[in-house]
Image (spheres, rainbow, N blue to C red):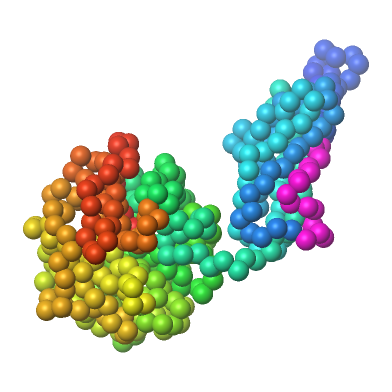
Amino acid sequence: MTRRALILLAAGVAAAGAGVFASGPATADVVPQPTVTSAVFPPDGQPGPVIRTPGTFTFSVPAASGVVEFDYVLNGTLSTPPGSNAHVAAGADGTATTPELRSAQFGTNTLTVEAVDAAGDVSEPATYTFSLTGSAQVDGYSDYDGDGHADLLSVGADGGLRFSAGGGDGSVASAVGTLPGTNLTGALIAGGGDERRGEFQDLFVYQNGNLYNAFGDGLGGFSPSQEVLVPAPSGQTAWPAFTQLCSPGDLTGHHRADLVGKVGDQLFLYSSVVMDRYNAPVATAGAGWSGRTVIGIVPAANGLHDLIARDDATGQVWLYPGAADGTFGDGTTRVLVGHGLTAARYPLLVSKGDANGDGLPDIWAVNKHGNLVLLPGVAGGGFGKAEKVSGHKAWAGVAELG
């Protein structure tokens, strides 16, 4: 019996007791339970496609049953009231098809759906289980949704973490919220790298003296339930007061995410030992870092990683060559590769490697006007003229890029 039928039944009983209805309680038609089919995801027990394969589901009830929409959720629980769930309108024939959905969950997946009529009555939920197999693909650095393109993370003015899918040509999609229920006001974020030796990219968050590792879900999101408090590095009682944190991926050859952090005037390498355990800090790249910003740590032609940084006041951009132990050269070995990127002109900037598909590292930046721009890498080193990516006002309030 539907929720509305129960309400009507109770009302009818009360009215009958008062002598209004001589014929007994009112009744309501039962909303039919929908059936589910999918051409892409065969029902459980049959081989399914690989994770993140896009596909649709079709819901159906008898025509003229009064159903106006179907509410559904993939690998979750339907919420109340019905309109708070994802939903699709039912056609006159009693059917509807979802937009393309993707799941990164290995093994059994479950889609739950209920039919809703015009009065708000809902059917008994129907479940459809299907299986997804693993993928040989390991996501590239800062590719959080597995489409082969570097993506951009940011912290909005409200402290919310935002995901912007990279288009592979330097563009990014509109930012969407992720890591729900978390306020990152005042936090440092360092996206990229895989601390689990899995397929998906992770996120590090430094806030109030604590370091957290949030596991990526492979679809551009991060789950609070998969967030781990990372202990202080070996021999230390606490993490230092970072003013910048970078997660460049694996610098030291152990296939886990290393960290590079700026503390005062010094830059330090924290190499990973095992999952979420780090060695004692090793000073790298000389001194003078209180007046510099690390733009990014990017793959080099020799198989190592180079560090790109700018002098905040002068806007000069320097490349610090990487060594096999994960450290970088200092002021005697750095190479000038750009200019004009002062902190006044570009308050926020980050390189996640190649963003426009030409094989050269690029820079995403928020300029003084609040626009998101791309500074494309050029052959031989350096960066070209800024190209506007987005002038949406939301970028003007961004506090962090990662």
Q: Which residue ends up furthest to the left in the rendered image?
A: 314
In the rendered image, which quarter is residue 326 located in?
A: bottom left
Taking the spot 28% from the left edge, 57% from the top edge, the residue there is 377
- Compared across the picture, whether 160 is left or right of 53 comes to left
Quadrant (top left/top right/bottom left/bottom right) for the C terminus: bottom left
Residues 121 and 92: in front is 92
- Compared across the picture, whether 159 is left or right of 107 comes to left
Q: Which residue ends up furthest to the bottom in the rendered image?
A: 235
* 70 vs 281: above or below: above
Residue 13 in view in this figure: no
Q: Does the magenta portion include 37?
A: yes
Taking the spot 63% from the left edge, 39% from the top edge, the residue there is 99
Q: Position of residue 343 (x, y in %)?
A: 15, 53
* 332 vs 343: above or below: below
- Compared across the picture, whether 248 is left or right of 255 comes to left
Q: Position of residue 393 (x, y in %)?
A: 30, 36
Residues 166 and 206: in front is 166
Q: Position of residue 225 (x, y in %)?
A: 52, 61
Q: Label the magenta part by its dominant secondary structure.
A: loop
In the rendered image, which quarter is residue 82 located in?
A: top right
Q: Does the magenta portion include 9?
A: no
Residues 379 and 180: in front is 379
Residue 69 in view in this figure: yes
Quadrant (top left/top right/bottom left/bottom right) for the N terminus: top right
Taking the spot 72% from the left edge, 28% from the top edge, the residue there is 90
Tell me where the magenta segment starts and ends, as one range.
Answer: 33-47
Taking the spot 24% from the left edge, 64% from the top edge, the residue there is 380
- Compared across the picture, whether 119 is left or right of 276 comes to right
* 122 vs 25: above or below: below
Q: Position of residue 22 (x, y in %)?
A: 89, 14
